[in-house]
Image (spheres, rainbow, N blue to C red):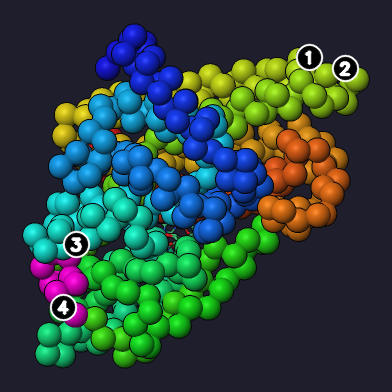
């Protein structure tokens, strides 16, 4: 992969920039800037998703036959980078990034014809029903039974840590359809509506103050068997394929690089303990240079693997490498940002995060959400599989240990 931008790449980048400049209205920008959490508020995020959908860029990673823009790998990367630098809202991309690739590979023709266009048009918000109270890292031990009844399954049980379940229209869910044999062999993969009778969603508040997480309860929920993706009891294969895209379907570097640029800006404003600007402080400069070097190295590796993806391969176990390094670098960048803003890190004003609120933030613009983001992103090394689990996968499937 040639990582220098050609004339065509530069004009593509300029076209993306021009679009973002025009489409990102002040209120959408403000909503995204004040996001303390992983995702921008559902209202702002859905507005942004609709704008991208109208432009045909929402599913920017998808092949054109299913409604993607048909971009090459470098163009996808440029788009993600420009979005991160412009501070676009972070989307609920579970449909785009997870359901889409799974339906493309394992869905029936009918599922492809209904589910994929609905994602391209952003008709529904999705949530992920994988984890259960006793099944996280050991996901295959999941219990939620789905018992056949005529053309349906009757689903009971509970899912936990379900991000965005409170605003989701649909869920992709792992259920147990057999208790015979190995635990991986009795799992099926279902898609269903969140408004079916028997579904209850209860909030779980994070210590950053955000409501992203939920516990979802199923009480005799009737789901058509036609909503199963892949054969009965073969859902583990589908689930693992989805996880490759959850961990590796996008580049981790653009948001971290955008954060690094903001950190440099902050260092030109904030004062070092020794007096003078932080940017001139030798200790800070050394840490910043080290972080930047590691981010750049990660970017090169990501581009190398993305180049392989453009040849039609799926992310494979390399997605674990990127998830591991990407989430850790993100946390390091936020940790340095906390250090850089000094006493402002102690200020907690959740009201200031609500666009249009008349609370005057005590912290300057660059520091308003830094602490909440830092706390929120502690979860990055847990969700989508913890760092320890990623290391196990790398040891076994990449290094062959
Ligand atoms: C913010 C957030 C959002 C989430 N969103 C969703 C969602 O939308 N949908 C969903 O289904 N799930 C979601 N999850 C759940 C997430 O996938 C699980 O939290 C994760 O897989 C870890 O499982 P656990 O919490 O049960 O921890 P455990 O599996 O109980 O792990 C506890 C500790 O033991 C370590 N550990 C466990 N097994 C091993 C091993 N074999 N080797 C070494 N160390 C090990 C882990 O690394 C961890 O440190 C989310 C979690 C968070 C924090």
Q: Secondary structure at mark 3?
A: helix
Q: Pointer 4: what residue?
A: 225
Closest to the observer: 6 or 369?
6
Q: What's the distance in space between the residues labelled 1 and 2, CA to CA?
A: 7 Å
Q: Looking at the picture, how far across and down is residue 53, in whole percent?
A: 35, 46
Q: Looking at the picture, how far across and down is residue 51, in whole percent?
A: 43, 45
Ligand 1 rendered quadrant: bottom left
Q: What's the distance in space between the residues labelled 2 and 4, CA to CA?
A: 67 Å
Q: In the rendered view of the protein, which quadrant contains the N terminus? A: top left
Closest to the observer: 172 or 325?
172
- Indicate which disc residue 280 carries: 1
Say few, some or many: other residues with alpha carbon within 10 Å of mark 4 (under 14 / 14 to 19 / 20 or more).
some
Q: What's the distance in space between the residues labelled 3 and 1, CA to CA?
A: 57 Å
Q: Does the numbered disc 3 mark a residue whose Cβ is under 8 Å from ligand 1?
A: no
Disc with the residue nearer the chain's start (3 vs 1): 3
- Indicate which disc residue 276 carries: 2
Disc with the residue nearer the chain's start (3 vs 2): 3
Magenta residues span 224-233
- Residue 343: image quadrant is top right
Q: Nearer the viewer, mark 3 or mark 2?
A: 3
Q: Does the numbered disc 1 mark a residue whose Cβ is under 8 Å from ligand 1?
A: no
> Which residue is at a point 36% across and 21% down the rendered structure image?
12
Mark 2 vs 4: CB contact within 8 A: no
- Residue 175: image quadrant is bottom left
């Amino acid at each position: 992969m040639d990582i220098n931008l050609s004339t065509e790449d530069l004009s593509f980048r300029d076209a993306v920039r021009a679009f973002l400049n025009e489409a990102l209205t002040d209120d959408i920008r403000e909503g995204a800037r004040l996001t303390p959490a992983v995702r921008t508020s559902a209202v702002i995020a859905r507005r942004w998703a609709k704008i991208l959908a109208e432009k045909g860029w929402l599913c920017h990673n998808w092949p054109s036959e299913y409604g993607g823009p048909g971009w090459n790998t470098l163009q996808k990367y440029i788009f993600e980078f420009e979005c991160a630098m412009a501070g676009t809202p972070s989307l609920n991309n579970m449909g785009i990034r997870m359901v889409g690739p799974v339906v493309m590979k394992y869905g029936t023709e009918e599922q492809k014809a209904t589910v994929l266009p609905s994602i391209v048009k952003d008709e529904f918000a999705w949530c992920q029903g994988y984890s259960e109270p006793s099944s996280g890292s050991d996901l295959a031990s999941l219990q939620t039974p789905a018992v056949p009844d005529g053309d349906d399954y009757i689903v009971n049980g509970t899912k936990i840590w379900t991000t965005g379940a409170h605003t989701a229209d649909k869920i992709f869910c792992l259920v147990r359809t057999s208790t015979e044999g190995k635990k991986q062999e009795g799992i099926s993969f279902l898609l269903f509506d969140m408004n079916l009778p028997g579904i209850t969603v209860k909030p779980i508040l994070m210590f950053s103050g955000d409501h992203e997480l939920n516990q979802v309860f199923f009480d005799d929920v009737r789901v058509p068997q036609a909503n199963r993706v892949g054969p009965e009891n073969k859902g583990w294969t589908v689930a693992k394929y989805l996880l490759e895209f959850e961990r590796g379907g996008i580049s981790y570097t653009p948001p971290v690089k955008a954060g690094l640029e903001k950190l440099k800006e902050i260092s030109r404003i904030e004062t070092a303990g020794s007096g003078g600007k932080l940017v001139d402080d030798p200790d800070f400069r050394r840490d910043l240079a080290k972080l930047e070097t590691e981010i750049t190295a990660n970017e090169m590796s990501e581009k190398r693997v993305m180049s392989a993806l453009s040849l039609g391969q799926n992310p494979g176990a390399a997605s674990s490498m990127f998830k591991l390094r990407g989430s850790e670098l993100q946390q390091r960048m936020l940790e340095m940002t906390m250090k850089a803003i000094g006493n402002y890190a102690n200020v907690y004003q959740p009201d200031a995060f609500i666009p249009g609120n008349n609370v005057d933030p005590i912290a300057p613009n660059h520091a308003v959400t830094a602490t909440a983001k830092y706390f929120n992103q502690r979860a990055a090394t847990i969700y989508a599989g913890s760092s320890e689990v990623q290391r196990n996968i790398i040891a076994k499937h990449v290094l062959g240990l």
